Amino acid sequence: MTESIPFNVPFLAVAVMIGIAFYIIISQRNLIKLVMGLSILASGVNLFLITLGYREGGVAPVYTHAPAGIMVLPVPQALTLTSIVIAVACLALMLSMVIHIYRHTGSTDSEKSRIMKG
Amino acid sequence: MRKIAIAVSLSIFIGFLIATAFLIHPFGYPPSEMDDYIIENTQSETGANNAVTAVVFDYRGFDTLGEATILFTAVTGVVMLFRAKKKREK
Amino acid sequence: MMSKIVRTMASFLILFALIYGLYIIMHGHSTPGGGFQGGAVVASGVALLIVAFGSHSIHRSLLERRLSILMSIGLLIFIGLAFGGMTGTFFYNFLVGSPIFGHVPPSGPNPGEMSSGGVIPIMDIGVGLNVAGGLSAILLVMALATTLTEAEE
């Protein structure tokens, strides 16, 4: 290693968020808490996409009344827009299925709705 | 026994994530050649002042088509899931 | 159904929310914003109406059939414009230079113009209708489903 190891704070925050989300998904039994863990995972990935494209001392990539300076990268922002909409759609479908499971079995415990009945 | 295996694999995974966060490029100096081309040639090729909207709708319009399809399918699924209850009551 | 003060202020604030959302959608090619962001603002205005008036009163005049028709019209506009540039490739910007939306702005910082951007403002309207109709339909159906389970148990 000929150069020093950079101490990136935003990438460390993303690693902590994804680690917490995986711990929630593995260890919790309540269905609503599982859905919350998946939502935290999606937010962590969106944060990682946005902080990949930052240039030091940059301005927004819009030319209308733009101040002087370097512009940040526009492509990661476009990918994050798509990812946010997909996360909202998946969250709506997951919550509808949780409502249906609650009506069918009477509890929100994931261990009680494991065995399929005829 | 199962709890020990889960704890070991989870700590290996989180250690790998934190080690990767130190090995990516330093924050604020991304390697970028494609975005330099897009920032230079947005106003002459697409005629829009907003580089992000030009990337979403012109340079990468196919991704927007796929994402509109996903939103349409999700709305269809949610409306269909809550329709069977009304029919069963009548 | 909430108290009289909340109902009066909600029916007054829905107008500002709709105009603000339409402003963000229409100026997508000059200022930050665009189709997805404006559609989400319009859907949040509909959420305010559902909370203030109760979902059964809203369901009498805003059926989810009409919201899905609005969503399909927006998606058809988007696909039709994508096929319209088929002389070059799929999704070709065929309106740059033509008198409809085709003024090319000078390079560098400049005050923006409304009639620029090629095929992008019309695609903004299509995607804005799609997102606004879709998110409002999801909110309305889920609010109706929770009141239905309280009534039958």
Image (spheres, coloured by chain):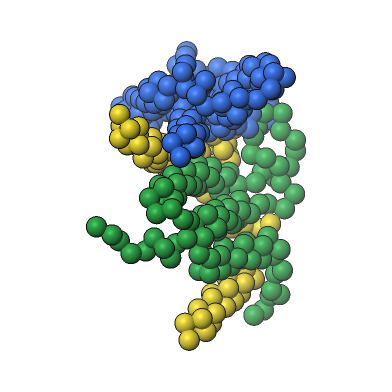
Chain colours: A green, B yellow, C blue
**Residue A9 x/y as whole percent:** 71, 63
Residue B19 vs residue C37, the one in the foreground: C37
> Residue farthest to the front?
C153
Image point 41% across, 63% down: which residue? A112
Nearer the observer, C60 or B7: C60
Residue C46's place in the image compared with C151, above or below, is above
Considering every residue shown, the one lying at the far bottom of the view is B1
Residue B37: x and y, percent? 54, 44
Residue C66: percent from left, percent from top: 40, 20
Between residue C18 and residue A83, name the one nearer to us.
C18
Residue at (64, 80) in percent of width and height = A1
Q: Can you say which quadrant of the picture contains the C terminus of chain B?
A: top left
For the point 45% across and 46% down, which residue is it? A99
Q: Who's the residue at 68% across and 26% down the image?
A: C110
Q: In this rendering, is residue B9 above or below C20?
A: below
Q: Can residue B58 be seen in this view?
A: no
Residue at the farthest left position = A118
**Furthest-top residue in this view:** C99
Picture layout, residue C81 above or below residue C15: below
Q: Can residue A101 be seen in this view?
A: yes
Residue C114 occupies which quadrant of the picture?
top right
Q: How many labels does the image show?
A: 0
**Can you give x and y, in whole percent of width and height, for residue A15 in the image?**
61, 66
Q: Report the side of B71 relative to A27 (left or right).
A: left
Which is more toward the observer, C97 or C18?
Answer: C18
Q: In which quarter of the image is residue C28?
A: top right
On screen, residue C101 above or below C149:
above
